[in-house]
Amino acid sequence: MENFKKIVLAYSGGLDTSIMITWLKENYKGCEVIAVTGNVGQGESELEGLEEKAKKTGASKLYVLDLKEEIVKDYIVPTIKAGAKYENVYLLGTPFSRPLIAEKLVEITKKENADAICHGCTGKGNDQVRFELGIRNFAPDMPVIVPWRSWEIKSREDEIEYAEKHNVPLKINRETNYSKDKNIWHLSHEGLDLENPANEPKYDKILEMGVTPQNAPDKETILTLSFEKGVPVSIDGEKMSVLDIILKLNEIGGKNGIGILDMVENRLVGMKSRGVYETPGGTIIYKAHEWLETLCLDKDTMHYKEQVASKFGELLYEAKWFTPLREALSAFIDKTQETVTGTVKLKLYKGNIINAGMTSEYSLYSEKTASFGEDDDFNQEDAKGFINLYGLPTKVKAKMKGE
């Protein structure tokens, strides 16, 4: 072990980092451990008692940083505007927080004149890459300690045994030991019975942000969501911050069984992983934004933006937020959102989001042109010449083949 005297630990109070303070003190003799927790909207119950717990297990102090506004402004909003998803379904809840927390870890490390940063990610996960690339962006030569790559602990069961042996308090047990990540946007569940894709998730035991569609009300919920330049700004005409909109829609969507995703994804490190995600508010925002774009974007921009959205989601998922390409894509996306302003009416019913109408001052939809009725702007005789020219390559090829 290197002779680090002061170590900053990314501290969530979960199983991994709960035992790491003790482990660091054991293995880096005489070192001071400073714990840092990012409040990204995981809830008061997750933060309750953290300082007492951190100090009891050996930390000299705990920083709890309120990052809710920053994660929304700097990460969630740009991704909403992009319409970005990973593998066409995952709304990127976990990747949102990692580069932001990495930035704050570096800030605290410099403030405290610490020697190294430690995180609790395993060698099988995506988050190790996200944290470490984020750290390198702000402190390229900062040493990073990763216990999972060197200690003798091999499983979560081993971690629980270590915690029990060293009197480290835990809020979990072997039966409920799902790996979870929660923030303002989502809650993820992995591990235990979910590791076998053949097993149906035990939703009655794992859901925390809402209910299944079967248990949702038998009556629809109707709301309107308004956007300005691709950013949600109000619910039912009431102006709200994006943070408050997400919180409100989490509540409404959760009650209506919205935003439950069970997927097998391709991890950055190469393996497939099965997880269950709860993203009620984000799912509503994405769907409304997607529909509004159909009204406000021209065909070429809309179709090309679909490709950009896929790449944008891939970059965020794969720890490439701090890259020239992501910044360039964000500039393109911001340009496309200049006219994505309007209101979408939605009906929520048992897990479904139904479009109930939308309006925009920038709408490109012309009822007169699209109508089956008489239209002075569109001469149907023009279609013959268009088809003759548009179909000329097909005609030439068919003649060449003798068909």
Image (cartoon, rainbow, N blue to C red):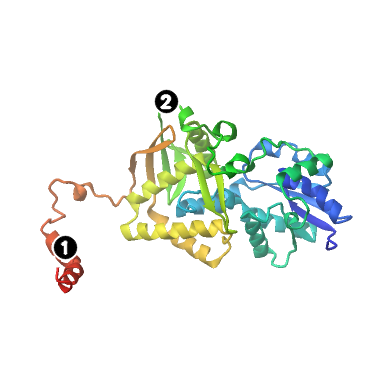
The foreground one among 276 and 64 is: 276
Residue 281 in the image: x percent, y percent? Answer: 50, 40
Determine the residue positioned at 46% across, 44% down: 285
Nearer the N terminus, badge 1 or badge 2? 2
User: Looking at the picture, does residue 99 appear above or below residue 289?
Assistant: below
Residue 40 in the image: x percent, y percent? Answer: 63, 45
In which quarter of the view is residue 186 placed? top right
* Residue farthest toward the left in the current orientation of the protein: 381
Residue picked out by circle 1: 387
Mark 1 belongs to which amino acid?
A: Ile
User: If the image is split into quadrants, where does the C terminus sit?
Assistant: bottom left
* Residue farthest toward the top in the current orientation of the protein: 218
Q: In this view of the protein, can residue 146 be seen by the observer? A: yes
CA separation, marks 1 and 2? 49 Å
User: Looking at the picture, does residue 303 appear above or below residue 17?
Assistant: below
Residue picked out by circle 2: 218
